[in-house]
Amino acid sequence: MASIHRAFRAGLFLGVLTLGFPGLSAQALDLDWKGEFRGETNTIYGYAHDATAVSGYAVKNTNDSPANFQNLFFSLRPRVLVNDNVSIHSNLWFNAPDSGFFGSNTTGNRTPTYHGAQSGTGAVTAREFFAEVATDFGTFRVGRVPLHYGLGLVWNSEGGLKSRLPSNGDAMTLSAKFGALKLTPSFVKYQQATTVSSVGPGANGSTSALQPLSGITDYSLGVSYSNDDEQLDLGLLFLRRLAGQNSGVVNPFFSRLYTDSPSTAGYAYNIWDFYVKKRSGIFTVAAEVPITSGLVASQQYSTVAGAVKASAAVSDRWTLKTNFGSASGQGNANQSKLTAFYFHPDYRPGFLMFNYNYQNIANGAGSYYDQPVTNARFFSFSGEYASGKFSHEFLTLFAFADQVADGTNAFFNTQLGRFETPGTGTIAAQSKNLGFEIDYGLGYNWDEFTRFGLDTGLYIPGGYYDFNNTPTPGAHKSVFGTRLSMVVKF
């Protein structure tokens, strides 16, 4: 009923508007909208633990612990219904979910990232605006569109409080259905560069060097199969990703190889992303496996990653869940190829691990929420109990590194996105133990629109984070964090 009233008022407003502007069509268009408001406060104890850290993974202690910061975010998503086949969608952001801090004039993402297209850092930004046209050939989308596939390892725009850097891009897409089969070809541009040149890996097809391209671009084809009777979903996304040395996009791996300067490494590689989801009675299992190969900074790049989510609704109130996955790391500089894979940062297995970027918090620069799964194998087990307006979630997470520094060769620092040379003296090898954490989340639904939340977690970092590239390893501390939040959706 509320949405009908909003649509009626919007149509009435547009009708009155046409009276004042005779050149406009006298036909009023339907306007409807959705939206979300978030307010939260975060407090993190013990994240900084090394007074002299200059290299490696130890977080330098600047006497600012505990960290305390608040986020404020509002999303308004109006939609214009032109007719039965044409609609215009938009998503207006007031602040940004990863950098809308209380008492700060930082209103947009701090730096352009490879996660999506940006539209400036004004007080209000257009995160999405696209036309959707239904035709006999399928549904066309043209404009700045949200991007999501599978579990969200490559493209992720599921939304929710955990979403900080959702995927989007300036795109042209077609979604055509043939019974249970759907084909989705698309062209996506994330960032326009100052250089417009060739579109191949090198001059005359050479693989010796990557030529500057027009920013960062994806060419993709998605094929999916959905059978409701068998409760089975299958999908394959082929993605060709191209970027030049002047792409203007900060990527934690591909744009910072061998240097502190961003945007210096062009790349041209393919991703074959497989997805499957099966439901049977109380059980649901879904898996995504992206396989990547190509060139990065004129070097061979090849890697395999994957994640699995499973759940069982054992009663009306209890749901048990598991989540495990693997993201390859980059070996030492003596390896013949590049192998690191970064999950999308909005794929967050835990509250404290693979969520907050403690290096950025200590340095006061970069996104505080850009800590993606990389160089890691993780496993989590959780249980959710819902009773009336309350919900409780308990989670345990364990993780181990795929690659570690050997103390002799140059090692790849996954947090800084570059190779670093070993320090002087005898450097001890790095441990593979990333640590474990225990989380508890409490939710309270005030009404159908408003939800209050309390999240707490205890993270015990492993010896992996003691590595500071010196003969004397650091000593990590336990990390304790809390988050109080309020979310209003309409």
Image (spheres, grey):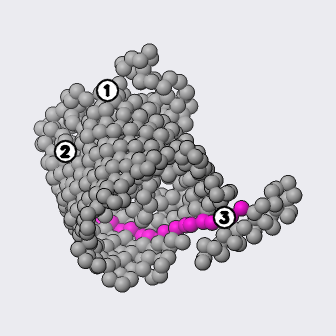
- Rate crowding at label 1 as few (under 14), some (14 to 19) or many (20 or more) other CA atoms within 10 Å: some
In the image shown, does 52 or 127 lie closer to the viewer?
127
Residue 100 lies, with reference to residue 412, above or below; the image says: below
Instruction: Point out the residue furthest to the top here.
Output: 204
In which image quadrant can residue 439 be found? bottom left
Badge 2 is on which residue? 402
The nearer-to-camera label among 1 and 3 is 3
Q: Evaluate whether residue 378 shows in this view.
A: yes
- Residue 260: percent from left, percent from top: 38, 37
- Residue 6: percent from left, percent from top: 65, 72
Calculate the distance from the C-alpha at mark 2 to the C-alpha at mark 3: 51 Å
In the image shown, does 407 or 146 lie closer to the viewer?
146
Kind of residue at badge 2: Asp
Marking on residue 317: none
The nearer-to-camera label among 2 and 3 is 3
Q: Residue at x 34, y 53 (%)?
A: 233
Q: Is residue 484 magenta?
A: no
Q: Is residue 34 magenta?
A: yes
Badge 1 is on which residue? 299
Badge 3 is on which residue? 31
Calculate the distance from the C-alpha at mark 2 to the C-alpha at mark 1: 21 Å
Q: Evaluate whether residue 416 shows in this view.
A: no
Secondary structure beneath disc 2?
Answer: loop
Segment tinted magenta in the rendering: 29-45
